[in-house]
Image (tube, grey):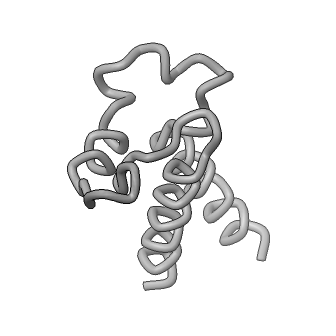
Amino acid sequence: MIFYLGYVCLLVLYLLYVQFSPGMGNIWYRNEEYFSPMGAINMIFAPFYVPQLWLPEFWDINFIVWTFLYVSIYIFYKFYY
């Protein structure tokens, strides 16, 4: 249960980070005019079809990297504590 709650929090933090990131920005709320939830969904799945997101300078906007780090930290915590 804690794992899933943490994953939802991770998703929210990721979407907020991408929305207000100076390198990306305006993903799901565009120019204070309209709300675009598909922009957020497309950004989550973008690493599967945009190879540039696997370069280290783009890891901060790659949701798969965020997920890998979250799962790694969770497993480390469960194993040692």
Residue 53 lies, in percent from the top left, at 49, 23
Residue 80 lies, in percent from the top left, at 78, 69
Q: Is residue 16 left or right of residue 43?
A: right
Look at the picture and state if 24 lies above or below 13: above
Look at the picture and state if 51 lies above or below 20: above
Q: Is residue 33 left or right of residue 60?
A: left
Residue 44 lies, in percent from the top left, at 36, 44
Question: In this orientation, which residue lies closer to the viewer: 31 or 46?
Answer: 31
Residue 47 lies, in percent from the top left, at 39, 29
Q: How many numbered marks, from 0 up?
A: 0
Residue occupying image coordinates x 62% and y 38%: 60
Look at the picture and state if 81 lies above or below 40: below
In the picture, the quarter occupied by the N terminus is: bottom left
Question: In this orientation, which residue lies closer to the viewer: 55 or 37?
Answer: 37
- View extreme (right): residue: 80
Question: In this orientation, which residue lies closer to the viewer: 23 or 33?
Answer: 33
The image quadrant that residue 74 belongs to is bottom right
Residue occupying image coordinates x 77% and y 77%: 81
Residue occupying image coordinates x 57% and y 52%: 20
Residue occupying image coordinates x 62% and y 61%: 75
- View extreme (bottom): residue: 1
